[in-house]
Image (cartoon, helix red, strand yellow):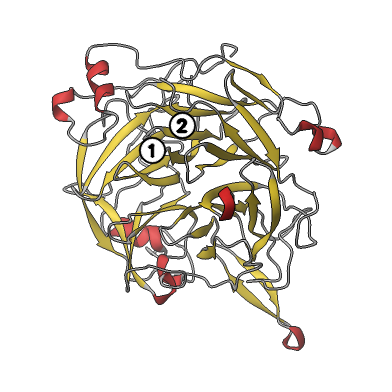
């Protein structure tokens, strides 16, 4: 791996004695307290790698090293934007969030978001649509045990900016619209009507589903959704919001969900509040909604939390002055504020979520932003902890977006920053390492997730739109 502009991660913490949850990161705090640099070579030096199936790829991708990876890892590439699919359409563009589910005969079923608006060169096509004027949605890919695609098809159509989402324990994918907008819905002889967006939708992970009937999960809120994570012990759904002044939400379903459709039976929406702190935020000196003030919250510091209820989860408008809109209602009740909530994932009995531009600001300008944070919410203890914070320089970690938790506990962060993007890992000792580099340009990594057997990481490059299956000696010391 060439030495990049991001060489290290600046992390501060409390002593190990004050940290009692967040395994496998406890050892990290002890190292920080001793003044040691908590980084690692990970799986080794990164080098150019050709896909193992390079001969099968579109002509303009043959013999191109799409990724840099550790020497002992390999990958296949498939689901290229514009390629024919099994349903007769072509692969949509703007691949984003994704999850993996076990299939028959060692196969894996992937449900993949496509972050598209109301116009697109490669839309999510199909007649069973939420809105005829919206081009986003999801596709489903069935991948064989040999990590080659078996079939693919569109599975949700007519939505807007399907950014991230999250898997459920009952084998569905909740896809999130990152918007608060409307589109035109053609209604045949009746003309047109307005379709509201800003909702979550549920997609079954089924190799024979075709396009599912789109049902907006209204009680989960209408706002700039990013991702969700489900606590399997309770069925509660945790939600992030991609705004500079975003909140972190919990949806409590009316019925404990065990199958597709249960979330549509409604429930109650809440926002996280740091106990004893009104509108707790990581503030810059000049602007309370941007970045973080150095030293205000240390890595490893625990914050007790509570939840405030949202009375109107489906607002017609957003207006800060009038307190109208989900996050504005939440903040009027003291909810905590995060700078661009993005990826979320459940693992290690925690709900991890990313504040993509939180952290110490790069300057004292009023609009200064940080280079990213990872937070962990402990549902059992009702505590929030900052577990990763990037340095103001952006070295080693810049603008983490999607996150996943490996079956063995490591965190993997997909960068969406300026310049070259990496997949960055955090191992069981709390050491950070670069695992993969996008060799094609500056497009973001997205949708990292693991197969049910833990042997394969699937991930997307958003542009030009590619899905990758990475495999190697995951159990090697990192």
Image vertical order of residue 130 relative to residue 106, above or below: below
- From mark 2 to mark 1, how far is it between C-alphas? 8 Å
* Residue 280 visible from this viewpoint: no
The reply to whether the C-beta atoms of the residues labelled 2 and 1 are less than 8 Å apart is yes
Residue visible at 36% across and 30% down in the picture: 388
* Quadrant in which the N terminus appears: top right
Q: What element carries label 2?
A: loop
Q: Is residue 267 left or right of residue 59?
A: left
Label 2: few (<14), some (14–19) or many (≥20) C-alpha neighbours in 10 Å: many
Residue visible at 27% across and 26% down in the picture: 295
Q: In this view, does 366 lie to the left or right of 16?
A: right
User: Which quadrant of the structure image shows residue 288?
Assistant: top left
Q: Nearer the viewer, residue 390 or 1?
A: 1
Q: Position of residue 386 (x, y in %)?
A: 30, 35
User: Which quadrant of the structure image shows residue 256?
Assistant: bottom left
On residue 423, the disc is none
Q: Position of residue 455 (x, y in %)?
A: 51, 36
Q: Nearer the viewer, residue 254 or 8?
A: 254
* Residue 233 visible from this viewpoint: yes
N-terminal label among 2 and 1: 1
Q: In this view, does 202 lie to the left or right of 257?
A: right
Q: Is mark 1 on a helix, strand or loop?
A: loop
Q: Nearer the viewer, residue 464 or 341?
A: 464
Residue visible at 24% across and 30% down in the picture: 300
Residue visible at 22% across and 32% down in the picture: 301
On residue 368, the disc is 2
User: Which quadrant of the structure image shows residue 409?
Assistant: top left
Extreme residue in the bottom direction: 189
Q: Position of residue 209 (x, y in %)?
A: 62, 67
Q: Mark 1 points at which residue?
A: 287
């Amino acid at each position: 791996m060439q030495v990049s502009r991001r060489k290290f991660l600046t992390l501060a913490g409390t002593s190990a004695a004050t940290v009692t949850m967040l395994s496998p990161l406890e050892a990290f705090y002890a190292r920080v307290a001793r003044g040691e640099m908590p980084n690692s070579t990970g799986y080794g030096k990164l080098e150019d790698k050709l896909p193992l199936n390079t001969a099968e790829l579109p002509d303009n991708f043959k013999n191109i090293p799409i990724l840099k990876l550790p020497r002992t890892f390999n990958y296949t590439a498939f689901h290229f934007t514009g390629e024919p699919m099994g349903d007769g359409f072509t692969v949509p563009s703007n691949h984003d969030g994704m999850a993996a589910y076990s299939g028959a005969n060692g196969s894996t079923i992937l449900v993949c978001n496509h972050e598209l608006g109301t116009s697109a060169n490669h839309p999510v096509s199909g007649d069973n649509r939420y809105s005829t004027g919206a081009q986003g949605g999801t596709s489903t890919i069935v991948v064989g045990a040999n990590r080659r695609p078996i079939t693919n098809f569109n599975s949700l159509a007519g939505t807007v900016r399907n950014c991230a989402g999250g898997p459920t324990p009952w084998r569905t994918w909740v896809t999130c619209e990152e918007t608060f907008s409307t589109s035109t819905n053609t209604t045949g002889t009746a003309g047109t009507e307005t379709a509201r967006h800003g909702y979550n939708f549920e997609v079954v992970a089924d190799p024979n589903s075709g396009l599912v009937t789109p049902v907006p999960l209204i009680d989960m809120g209408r706002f700039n959704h990013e991702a969700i994570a489900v606590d399997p012990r309770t069925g509660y759904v945790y939600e992030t919001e991609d705004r500079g002044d975003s909140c972190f939400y919990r949806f409590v379903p009316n019925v404990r969900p065990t199958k597709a459709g249960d979330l549509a039976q409604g429930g109650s929406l809440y926002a996280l509040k740091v106990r004893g702190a009104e509108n707790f935020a990581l503030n810059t000196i000049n602007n309370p909604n941007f970045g973080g003030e150095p030293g205000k919250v240390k890595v490893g510091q625990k914050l007790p939390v509570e939840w405030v209820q949202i009375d109107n989860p489906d607002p017609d408008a957003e207006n800060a002055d009038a307190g109208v809109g989900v996050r504005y209602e939440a903040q009027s009740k003291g909810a905590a504020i995060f700078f661009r909530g993005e990826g979320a994932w459940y693992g290690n009995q925690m709900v991890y979520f990313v504040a993509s531009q939180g952290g110490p600001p790069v300057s004292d300008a009023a609009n200064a932003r940080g280079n990213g944070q990872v937070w962990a919410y402990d549902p059992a203890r009702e505590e929030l902890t900052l577990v990763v914070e990037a340095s103001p320089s952006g070295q080693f970690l810049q603008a983490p977006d999607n996150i996943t938790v490996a079956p063995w506990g490591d965190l993997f962060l997909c960068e969406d920053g300026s310049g070259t993007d990496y997949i960055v890992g955090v191992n069981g000792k709390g050491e950070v390492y670069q695992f993969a580099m996008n060799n094609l340009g500056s497009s973001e990594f997205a949708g990292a997730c693991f197969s049910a057997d833990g042997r394969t990481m699937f991930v997307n490059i958003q542009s030009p739109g590619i899905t990758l299956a990475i495999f190697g000696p995951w159990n090697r010391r990192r």
